[in-house]
Image (spheres, helix red, strand yellow):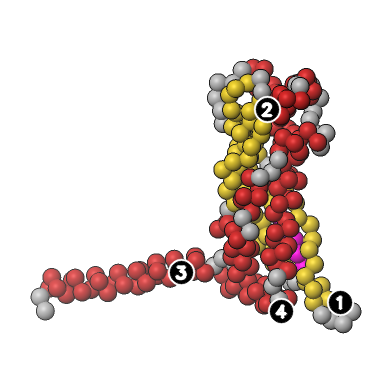
Amino acid sequence: MCPIWRLLVLLSLLSLPSALHKQGLAKAHVDSKPALARIIAQGLMKHNAEGRIQNIRLMESLNASGQMAPGMVGWLISSMSLQQQQESSANVTNIQLDYGGIRMSFHKEWFSANISLEFDIDLRLSFNNKIIKIHVCMNLVMEFCLEKDEFGRRDLVIGSCCVEQSSIYTTVLTEDISPKMKHFLRHFRENLVKVTPHLVESQVCPLISEILRQLDVKLLKSLMEQAVAHKFNQL
């Protein structure tokens, strides 16, 4: 065999482990997501979680909850006629639940799911024809555990399910806003932080609870053990 062909064969053999290693890493990345995270993601998609969030009646909730702060926000809303209030709207759009990024934590027979989501709010007030777009981000954490009854049988117990207050972030995307509207929006965003978490929780938490309750408890425990073992092997 001539020297040039020997060199080509040697290079191809040296590159083979690298190619196989890259394929292995890609497959490991796909398979590394805990099965429970995939089940939750598929269930949320099946039950149209994003559509449920989009149908939230945000403006009505802000008015009904009594969360409207005094000052500019309270003055603007209270000074509107009923017709003007009905002509105003705050619609939730562009919802993005991070299905592929659901993070699971496990400890013995306790586990939690951390889901990040973001969406836009299109705000339109009757005295201002311009639609103002506000972007909202947050993380929702739901906790579960398996508890034994007096006969030693395990049952799924739903723990807390809430948006992490520190994860909530709002920003105004619309430019060229008047100083008066900027003052209003500052108060409006403060009230969004108070109201939107509860609205999101009311839509997403029952869905996750329903998804997991449909699983056999023995299967659930097996999935938890697999996830813990997989995490331990990665250390």
- Above or below: residue 90 compared with residue 106: above
Confirm or deny contact between disc 1 and disc 4 (CB under 8 A).
Answer: no
Confirm or deny contact between disc 1 and disc 3 (CB under 8 A).
Answer: no
Dot 3 falls on a residue whose secondary structure is: helix
- Above or below: residue 133 compared with residue 56: above
- Among numbered discs 4 and 3, the one appearing first in the sequence: 3
Q: Residues within 10 Å of mark 2 (few under 14, many from 20)?
A: few
Confirm or deny contact between disc 4 and disc 2 (CB under 8 A).
Answer: no
Spatial CA span between label 1 and label 4: 15 Å
Spatial CA span between label 1 and label 3: 40 Å
Residue occupied by mark 4? 218
Residue 27, which numbered label?
A: 3
Q: In the displayed image of the protein, which residue is found farthest to the top?
A: 179
As for residue 84 lying within the magenta part, the answer is no
Q: Position of residue 47 (x, y in %)?
A: 63, 59
Q: Which residues are magenta?
A: 141-145
Q: Mark 1: which amino acid?
A: Asp
Who's the residue at 67% across and 32% down the image?
A: 89
Q: Position of residue 85 (x, y in %)?
A: 73, 27
Who's the residue at 61% across and 55% down the image?
A: 48
Callout in the foreground (3, 2): 2
- Among numbered discs 4 and 2, the one appearing first in the sequence: 2
Q: Residues within 10 Å of mark 4 (few under 14, many from 20)?
A: few
Q: Position of residue 20 (x, y in %)?
A: 37, 72
Residue 87, which numbered label?
A: 2
Answer whether residue 232 is visible to the viewer in this image.
no
Q: In the displayed image of the protein, which residue is found farthest to the bottom?
A: 151
Q: Mark 4: which amino acid?
A: Lys
Answer whether residue 156 is visible to the viewer in this image.
yes
- Among numbered discs 1 and 3, the one appearing first in the sequence: 3
